[in-house]
Amino acid sequence: MADNYLERRMEEYRHSRQGAATPRAAMHTPHNLRPGQVLIDYPPMRVLVTDIDTPVSQAVIDMLRRFNCRVAITGPDPVLGNRLAQKAGAQYHPYGPQAAIDRLDSAGDPVTIAITFSPLRLSVPTLTPPQEIIDAGPQATAAWVIYAAHPSSRHLYLTC
């Protein structure tokens, strides 16, 4: 019995490492949303966030993690990067954004999209929030990123 338990736990661990979404406490549908509530069905995505030393990027990382994205972060300060990665459940890469993309790609976990707050030329699709969105505050920027990064708008529901 113990061997079976260990095998089952190892299989669950392997499955979760391959990007399986964690079960949610309460499943919402478009029919049982409260006014002002948003339902977003997000596919498992590997997201790279650069420029992690701002409150805006930290809000974006937190929101992406809430939507079960696998987040990798990169920045020049390893102390801040490691602390933020541990707090948010992300991976910190101390080298530049393109090197992080190449390293994740060679590890078999390619980056789906990169989110940056300064113009960079990267080998993956990149989102750069407009300045007026950034000026609106961290939560507005995080919401913009969530909507803009979604591969299809057919799973986005908003009730008013």
Image (cartoon, rainbow, N blue to C red):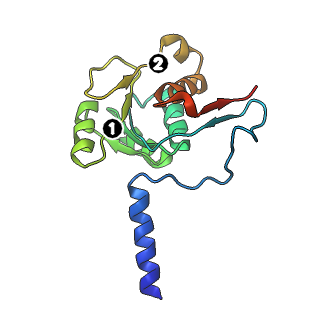
Total numbered labels: 2
Which residue does the numbered mark 2 point to in the structure image? 129
- Which residue is pictured at 39% across the width and 57% down the height? 17
Q: Is residue 55 visible?
A: no
* Disc 1 target residue: 111
Amino acid type of the residue tagged 1 in the rendering? Val
Q: CA distance from mark 2 to mark 1?
A: 18 Å
Farthest-out residue, right: 35
Q: Position of residue 36 (x, y in %)?
A: 74, 29
Relative to 49, is 28 on the left or the right?
Answer: right
Q: Residue at x 57, y 27 (%)?
A: 143
Q: Tell me where residue 64 appears, x and y as whole percent.
A: 50, 38
Crowding at mark 2 (Cα within 10 Å: few <14, some 14-19, many 20+): some
Q: Amino acid at mark 2?
A: Pro
| Image side of residue 26 versus residue 11, left or right | right
Left or right, 13 with reference to 74: right
Say which residue appears at 49% left-offset and 30% top-offset.
152
- Under tag 2, what secondary structure? loop
Q: Position of residue 110 (x, y in %)?
A: 30, 41
N-terminal of the pair, mark 2 or mark 1, is 1
Judge the density around disc 1: few (<14), some (14-19), many (≥20) Cα neighbours within 10 Å.
Answer: many
